[in-house]
Image (cartoon, rainbow, N blue to C red):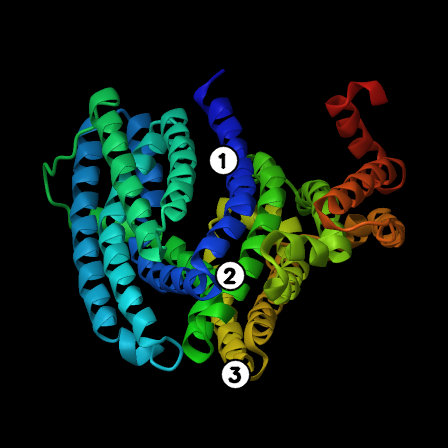
Amino acid sequence: MNQLKKGAILNYVTIFLTNAVGLLLTPFIIRHLGDAEYGLYTLIGAFVGYISVLDFGLNNTIVRFVAKYRAEKNRLKEENFLGTTMLIYAFISFLIVVIGGICYLNLESIFSESLSLEQLDKAKIMFLILIFNLAITLPGGAFTGICSGYEAFVFPKAVNIIRYVIRSITIVAVLLFGGDAIAMVIVDTAMNLLVIGIQAFYVFKKLKVRFRIHQFELPIIKEILGYSIWIFVFAIVGQFQWRSGQLVLGMVTNTTTVAIFAVGVMLGTYYGAFSTAISSVFLPRATQMTVAKASSEELTSMMVKIGRLSLMVLLFILGAFILYGKQFVFLWVGPSYQESYNIALLIMLAYTLPLVQAFANSILEARHKMAFKALVYLLFTLMGTGVGYLLAHTHGATGMILGSILGWIVGQIIMNYYYYTIIELNIFRFFKELFYKILPFFLLMLILGYAINYLPGKGWLNFIGKAALYSAIYVLLAYQIGMVPSEKKLFQKAIPFLK
């Protein structure tokens, strides 16, 4: 089995492990830290997350250029490029320390209305540790990019999986022995430093990579920054999309509300991971079809095919969450987090359309037309954050997420117009074929799922019983009613006895 296939398998292992461990570990952390301190932990993490965009997309840039120079067998240019990149990273680390220092001196004024004096003291300590963490780990990320450029996927992915498992076990042990949020931040920093050291050893000793500036070239810096700028813009969008709510709520409410919001966002991001696991398998096809000059109708057909598969998986999760999500949240993290259900459900509803249209995003990448989407999403994500800020004063965490998703929805509507007029995808056909058979099947599933809710009992056993019955009926009805013949063939290949 080659590195690509092994890397793909490890990707799925990582997704499953992250989601499964996250679901198990989160309630444990909340119980040991308490709602307020867990909220403080996520708040400071979100705040530092904004500074992390100073990576400027260099990690992705390293993958592209290292792969390019390897294909050209130009070792000299590769060494020169990597040496130049390390200079840029050194400047970025210096910038992180300076900006971090300015933010540190203003933490009291930023969070004076929402944090107590004790919380502010802890926040300052965590912030300093995380700034140090960031200043080291951003340049350290170059080693992962180099491995990807060398198509050596297995080692870094395996190391990260092992790191995640060890980190989770260590967090449990630290909390059991009375550790707090500061201890968790120290564990994360120590783990990151260890992983960077291991990956650096692998890159230098196994891959024989060297960092040397043979000749300082301004054009290569312009080329690096020219490629990475739109990745940087999307990084800003990602920070605002998933972290702005926590920061805003930390400024206008309290850390308990931040904790409730963070749990809802976590569930929403897990929802997206399941769809990505499907769509990412098909994404390289966009580049192949673009190079082959595929027609708009052919691209639309592929978009429909991927979109329908993603939609069936997403509706399985969405339907279950609509029907049994409140019970799950109650059992998982307790009654004080019931608002997290509303936040997660709103994210899932708003996030579904962008997820089922993931192939359109790949077409934009293949055609080098990401600039328009980057600017649209940046503008309307900022707008949504502003609306969320206003609503958060009166409606708390739910108001914040309502404002945020308003920005996402408007941005996605504009992108569909762009797909139709500029990329020339047949969007009307896409939606017609996307919902064909799936929509009536899903409505029937909601009715049957609602009836399942009347099963007697309480607790985890009752929830698992309902979830198992729902899952069995969903799969059966999806196959019998929701799937078109080509989808049934794919299903039959996965489960041979259905043939």
Question: What secondary structure is found at the residue carrying circle 2?
Answer: helix
- The reply to whether callout 3 and callout 2 are in contact (CB within 8 Å) is no
Q: Is residue 424 above or below residue 393?
A: above
Name the N-terminal-most of marks 2 and 1: 1
- Assess whether mark 3 and mark 1 are in contact (beta carbons under 8 angstroms): no
* Residue 88 on image: x %, y %: 19, 50
Rounded to the nearest angstrom, the CA distance separating label 3 from label 2 is: 17 Å
Task: Residue 271: tell me if it is visible.
Answer: yes
- 3D distance between C-alphas at marks 2 and 1: 21 Å
Say which element carries label 1. helix
Can you identify the residue that label 2 sits on? Answer: 262
Q: Percent from the top left, x then y, of residue 214?
A: 10, 36
Residue highlighted by disc 1? 14
Q: Quick check: 295 left or right of 66?
A: right
The relative height of residue 233 versus residue 165 in the rendered view (above or below) is: below
Badge 3: few (under 14), some or many (20 or more) residues near its Cα, within 10 Å?
Answer: some
Q: Estimate the x, y position of residue 471 in percent, counting from the top left.
A: 78, 40
The residue singled out by tag 3 in the image is 393
- Name the foreground residue: 133 vs 427: 133
Q: Amino acid at mark 1?
A: Thr
